[in-house]
Image (cartoon, rainbow, N blue to C red):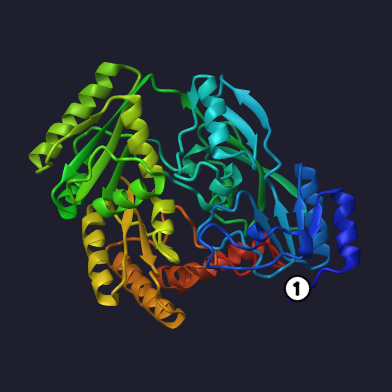
Amino acid sequence: MFNKLKLDDIRALERIAPTRVLTQAQINEDYFHDELGTAFGVPEALVKVLTTAEVSQVLKYAYEHDLPVVTRGSGTGLVGGAVATSGGIMIDTSLMKKVLDFDQSNLTVTVEAGMLLMELAAYCDQRGYQYCPDPGEKSATIGGNISTNAGGMRAVKYGVTRDAVRALTAVLPNGEIIKVGSKVVKNSSGYDLKDLIIGSEGTLAIVTQATLKIIPKPEYAISILVPFATMSQAISTVPKIIGAKVTPVAIEYMSCDTILFAEEYLGKKFPTHASDAYLLMTFDSNTQEAAISDMHTIADLCLEEGALDVLLIDTEERSASVWSARGAFLEAIKSSTDQMDECDVVVPRSAVADFILYTHEVARTVSMRIPSFGHAGDGNLHVYICRDKADDETWQDKKSKAFSMMYAKARELGGLVSGEHGIGLAKKEYLASTLGDTQIQLMKAIKRAFDPKGILNPGKVI
């Protein structure tokens, strides 16, 4: 279907991006996989781009010569979405890190796609503003966050990446540069192409610039850690928190075993791990009184629902201990096993407890360790199947059975395949079985409209 790169193709790419084109023997192996490492592919050429114009020229050339293209930022994905499984050209946007515009009047910041989430957060914070999406992987690029519609811990109050994107500059597969959306707050102007591109995992267009919503940074924030005797008690309290007419910034759940993994990984002690399950919540406001009032409302509710205690995270040391542990959960679980794979399922908030308890049943059925944590406040759960010395055949068989059971349960509960990590290569079959043929065919028609030759990130999502 696609052509292989020849020497003439490499020379053409070198004219577009002098000194920034690497061929197979020169490409670091880190580019062959993403963070989870279950998908593998070697690009024939890696192009480190600096501008939208360079992306346009590379795509125009690839389109004319039937060469597949995959885009990559930091490579922190977990579903093989930025892996060159068809060879071809990999476009690395990680050098595109400029802030192009900071607009206090319209509360927007415009950045290039290669800027890291942590860099954007620091830039806004220094000016007294906040970019609201807060995915756990702070070294991910903004372009990568946009490609998967990343969520994170502040989604309960502030929404996900899509809610923060005002406009995009993107390059179509034929090299044409388009600008979709604008700085306006409201828009009822035809089909929203911006929202189609967000979450499309680089299969429709390559995002090079983004205009993002920012807010004045809340003046005060406070967190609480709430231990429960059982996971069922903790998770079943979440819908009642949501219905209490108080909106926490974050509602995270964690189990004792996950905390212990994080302690060992970080070499630091968590404030407590005497209970089976915990909820971690943050409240913010422009006044200390309002944040504390919200916190007390929810603390009292949790105690009424059987919480064993409410621990106030009121010092920098304790806050750093708790949130650094939460941020390290993925790496901690990963370091505890030989190999793992993730079920990034999302279910209605009222069904979180049912799903988490079901994962325990799955673990018993397949005789595998399946730790979890997640964003209880928005129903997005991170469930990890751990290999733990299983041989290849056993690992593949048990993993497939566990995934099939969990995604079937998610469908039964009204959930979907992915809350924020995307589909990529790893979750395609589960997306198809969840959405059904009609929706998949509509998605394929959209793909053809944007990319009639199918050169952008082939084999991913659908």
Q: Residue at x 82, y 68 (%)?
A: 5
Q: Position of residue 77 (x, y in %)?
A: 53, 55
Judge from the rendering whether residue 407 lies leftward or rightward of residue 354; answer left or right. Answer: right
Left or right of 454 in this view: 105: left
Residue under the image location 12 percent in, 32 percent down: 300
The x and y percentages for residue 315 are 31, 24
Left or right position of 78 against 261? right
**Against 67, is 118 above or below?**
above
**What is the quadrant of residue 53 in the picture?**
top right
Q: Position of residue 210 (x, y in %)?
A: 62, 39
User: Where in the figure is residue 443, as x and y percent of width and height?
Assistant: 54, 64
Front residue of 25 and 148:
25
Tell me, yes or no, if residue 155 can be seen here: no
Vertical order, 284 against 240 (above or below):
above
Q: Which amino acid lies under the numbered mark 1 shown in the image of this protein? A: Phe
User: In front here: 438 or 84?
Assistant: 84
The vertical placement of 6 against 14, above or below, is: below
Question: Label 1, on which residue?
Answer: 2
Farthest residue in the bottom direction? 393
Q: Secondary structure at mark 1?
A: loop
Residue 174 or 269: which is nearer the viewer?
A: 269
